[in-house]
Amino acid sequence: MSVASALMGGMETFTLVPRGPFSLASSIRFLEGFAPAAYSGPRDAVLELAFPVEGSWETVGVRVRQDDRGKVTAEVVSPESPGAELMRAVRAQVERILSLDVDGSGFPAVGERDPVVAGLQERYPGLRPVGFWSPYEAAAWTIIGHRIRIRQAAAIKARMAEQLGEPAEFGDRVVYAFPSPARLAALESFPGLGGRKPEWLRSVAVAALDGQLDTARLRELPRETALKELKKLPGIGDFSSGLILLRGAGDPDAVSYHEPRLALAVADAYGLPGPATPEQLTEISESWRPYRTWVILLLRTQQEISAARALNCG
């Protein structure tokens, strides 16, 4: 990743040069249909983010653009005078959120090996996984959404951001960040959170404050070790731990064997008679390395779009 930093128009900015295909417009379209993000920002290929920065957990507002040459520029809108350490942390987090921390120059070769992937790459050009803003937020999402409908969970998460999180102003638009771990660690109750969910969220918050959910730490651990550690958190099981590692920490090359919708998506794409078995997933995904997570995103995107079209036609 080629990176440059500058001060433009009174605001700190940094520049990211993607290695391999990348489309910010595709990322934005994905977020608009991704319920946990509840993204409804500007339509002119600008991404406006608000999130607590890993480590310091200070809330920042970041505006991201991509020019005609593919270069990505991120402008830190708030706070007004971020220090060098905060800027480094923000840059690393934005890179990870957009999967720009991964060299994608070898991704087209996956399509050359697998005609199904080639079709997906053509259908969704430049789309890379867009992660949760942090593993901490991904973990909180899995708890909020436990045993309730995804749209109901998304509404609860959005209300938590508005009532407990900090705002970031983008001109006349305000974006509320998900609450910092310190705020969530003191949570006693919240409308819509039943059972032990407040207790589990407090545990996730404490783990984040202790560094257990740090992105770099999770990515450096052997995958099975990271999953095992995540499952030690109350309320986190097989599916949740996989989501935190893949969509929170941004592991680019993993397969979640506990995601039933993935088994169906692979069956549809590869013409299998039934949901893909773990053995079939292992065999088919071998040619996707080292971008298995990326291919899975494309498969799931196609599945969701097909389901939405079928629902509309019905």
Image (spheres, rainbow, N blue to C red):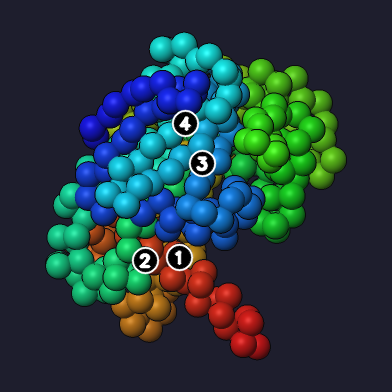
Label 1: how many residues lie within 10 Å, few (<14), some (14-19) or many (20+)? some
Which comes before the other along the chain, label 2 or label 3?
2
Which comes before the other along the chain, label 4 or label 3?
4
Q: Position of residue 202 (x, y in %)?
A: 68, 25
Tag 3 secondary structure: loop
Q: Quadrant of the N terminus?
A: top left
Which comes before the other along the chain, label 1 or label 2?
2
- Which residue is label 4 attached to? 75
Label 3: how many residues lie within 10 Å, few (<14), some (14-19) or many (20+)? many
- How far apart, in angstroms, are the residues tagged by discs 4 and 3? 19 Å
Say which of 117 and 246 sits in front.
Answer: 117
Tell me whether the residue at label 2 lies in contact with that at label 4, contact meaning CB atoms closer than 8 angstroms: no
In the rendered view, does 95 fall on the left or right side of 171? Answer: left
Residue name at image x 36 percent, y 66 percent = 124
Tell me whether the residue at label 1 lies in contact with that at label 3, contact meaning CB atoms closer than 8 angstroms: no
User: Which mark is on residue 132?
Assistant: 3
- How far apart, in angstroms, are the residues tagged by discs 1 and 3? 16 Å
Q: Is residue 108 above or below residue 170?
A: below
- Mark 2 or mark 3, whichever is nearer to me: 2
Q: Position of residue 196 (x, y in %)?
A: 75, 36
Q: Is residue 278 visible?
A: no
- Which residue is label 2 attached to? 124
Residue name at image x 57 percent, y 83 percent = 310
In the rendered view, does 226 fall on the left or right side of 158? Answer: left
- Which residue is label 1 attached to? 301
Which comes before the other along the chain, label 1 or label 3?
3
Label 4: how many residues lie within 10 Å, few (<14), some (14-19) or many (20+)? many
- Mark 1 or mark 2, whichever is nearer to me: 2
Amino acid at dot 1: Thr
